[in-house]
Amino acid sequence: MKKTKTKQKIKGNKFERLIYAVAITLVLISPISIVFSKATLSKLNFEVEEKKQEIASQKKENDSLAMAIDELASLTKIQEVAQSEGLSYNNANIKVVR
C-alpha cells in the first residue's frame, strides 16, 4: 500500500471570504480616494483665494466711492453748485432735520 499525499484545499467560510474581499477592495481604493480628495481640496483653496482677491478689490472700490460721496456732499461743493445754478447761500433759511 502506497500512501499518496493528497492536497486538500482549505476553504474558508463565506464570512472570511467576504472580509478578505472587503480588505483587498479598501487597500486598492484608498490611494485613489486620497489623491481625489487632495485634488478637490486644492481646487477649493484656489477658489477661496480668488474670492478673497475679489473681496479686497470690491472693498477698495467701495472705499473710493465713499470718499467721492464725502467730497460731493461737502459744504464747499454744495455752495459751488448753488452758485453755478444762480442760487445764494443764506444760513437763515437752512433748517436741520434729524
Image (cartoon, rainbow, N blue to C red):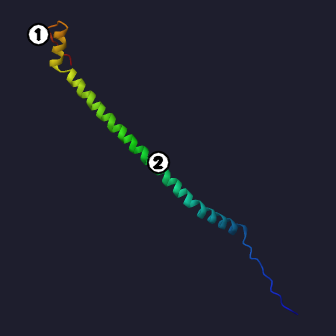
Residue at 60 percent of width and 62 percent of height: 28
Q: Nearer the viewer, residue 64 or 19?
A: 64
Mark 1 and mark 2: span between their CA atoms? 64 Å
| Residue 43 circle label | 2
Q: Position of residue 24 (x, y in %)?
A: 63, 65
Mark earlier in primary sequence (1, 2): 2
Q: Is 14 located above or below residue 44 in the figure?
A: below
**Can you identify the residue that label 1 sits on?**
92
Dot 2 surroundings within 10 Å: few (below 14), some, or many (20 or more)? few
The quarter of the picture where residue 80 lies is top left
Q: Is 85 located above or below residue 2 in the figure?
A: above
Q: Disc 1 marks which amino acid?
A: Ala
Left or right: residue 75 compared with residue 50: left
Residue at 80 percent of width and 83 percent of height: 6
Left or right: residue 16 compared with residue 45: right
The quarter of the picture where residue 61 lies is top left
Q: Position of residue 89 (x, y in %)?
A: 13, 10
